Image: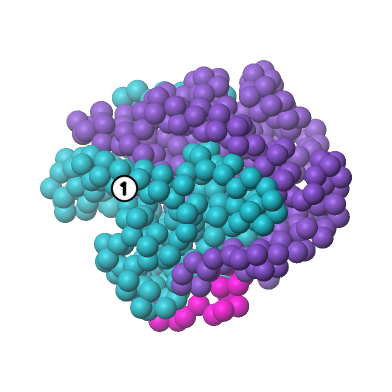
Chain colours: A purple, B cyan
Amino acid sequence: MNDTLQTLYNHVSIRQYTDQPVAEETLQQILRAACSGSTMGNMQLFSIIVTQDNEMKKKMAPFHFNQPMATQAPLILTFCADFHRFNRYCEFRQAETEAYSNLQSYHWAVTDALIAAQNACVAAESLGLGFCWLGTITYNVDKFVEVLELPRHVVPVACITMGYPAVRPALTQKLPVEAMVHRETYHDYDETSINHIYEEKEASEETRQILEENQLENLAQVFTQRRYTKKDNEYFAEVLTNVIKKQGF
Amino acid sequence: MNDTLQTLYNHVSIRQYTDQPVAEETLQQILRAACSGSTMGNMQLFSIIVTQDNEMKKKMAPFHFNQPMATQAPLILTFCADFHRFNRYCEFRQAETEAYSNLQSYHWAVTDALIAAQNACVAAESLGLGFCWLGTITYNVDKFVEVLELPRHVVPVACITMGYPAVRPALTQKLPVEAMVHRETYHDYDETSINHIYEEKEASEETRQILEENQLENLAQVFTQRRYTKKDNEYFAEVLTNVIKKQGF
């Protein structure tokens, strides 16, 4: 197995970091990797906001629901779907500037931003850093647009804390690979196949602890009744929908 | 520089492949990498459709606008945002099944699918394969839903051709890294900074050829007048918007 596969297979989210700062040279290596990925028509429809200043971390923290890593991580990278820079280019070259104010174009920029984000993550892990994605970025997306001073046609889509691991947890219990893979066409899941693919995960110690903490019967209920409820999701969906529109897509 | 950084930095899209098939063992390594990435709440909200059958490639080709690589590549991986499997799990565990029928949840699944896709790409390159993303997947997304037999709550978001490179082109001319990077807050672009970041790209031989072929003054016009016109983008935006809704988000 080559080193890259080893890095990919051994990924685990790191939520606690040592005090060691991320050197500028290391940051540059991560940023270069982020900017080396595939992008739609080579348009590079993304931007990366680097957060290292403690004041900025404190400003953003409430919108990340004050998760400790949002202030404790030495480095935060926020990846934005960005058609603004390209539109500016069009503006200064006498080309149409409203060709990309639609949801298809938004999707291209989201894809570019997420390819860049995952490249940054892989690079970081290869350099001994750990990271964790903060899903909260698309919840309170209106607040992040404000705090990061994002212009029209820029929407933050991924936020990643990075630093040197203080604690390295065991690999997360995931579904078996074949659960996600379909040959030629989609095969649907029935009760038997769902039971089969969730079997190991449901039997794990991790799951037992989660159920005990939540006093619920199974993982599905932990998600729908506690972690990500219909009411919350619908509220944050409205926020996100409004921001995408307001930002011009 | 470690091997992983070298793989990431040297990425170039491969559009022509040798006849060498992708061995099942190699495919399994790529799929395992895809399934090892971060996912929202460890829900694994994605599916991968593996296309190796020539009949399936031919069926999909017109919706990829008959790009040669859509039939010539030995392997095509289509990554889908997938809340169907998780909803099925909820259904069989007496949990709410309509908690995730909204755009916020769609965004989580898109993110999971794209992380998986980029991990697959990095793994493939580390193994000597080449790949190319087909942007057409989100254009004719309605057709792909049909051909791949995707149920409600499943939307294809990335499609990647893979195989062994027949030709290895030079690295693509990209904007300098600092063009995409903002420290603490977004810095806007004025005419001077746009000129500066596009300078090398506009001066390249690649650009000269593109302008000659298109008989246009600059790259911005090539994009807005030829490659991705407002009219086309708006048409495909409507298709995509309708599919996202029809698929239950």
The quadrant in which residue A199 appears is bottom right
Tell me which segment is drawn in magenta.
Answer: B17-31
Whether residue A52 appears in this view of the structure is: no
Q: Which residue is mark 1?
A: B239
The quadrant in which residue A166 appears is top right
Q: Quadrant of the N terminus of chain B?
A: bottom right
**Observer-nearest residue: A138 or A126?**
A138
Q: Is residue B28 magenta?
A: yes
Q: Position of residue B172 (x, y in %)?
A: 38, 53
**A173 w.r.t. A149: above or below:** below
Residue at x 38% of width, y 74% of height: B56
Most extreme residue toward the front is B94
Question: From the viewer's perspective, is B221 left or right of B51?
Answer: left
Q: Position of residue A119 (x, y in %)?
A: 56, 49
The quadrant in which residue A194 appears is bottom right
**B8 w.r.t. A192: above or below:** above
**Count of marks placed on residues:** 1
Q: Position of residue B26 (x, y in %)?
A: 58, 75
Residue at x 65% of width, y 38% of height: A228
**Observer-nearest residue: A190 or B7?**
A190
Residue type beneath disc 1 = Val
**A231 w.r.t. A164: above or below:** above
Q: Is residue A212 magenta?
A: no
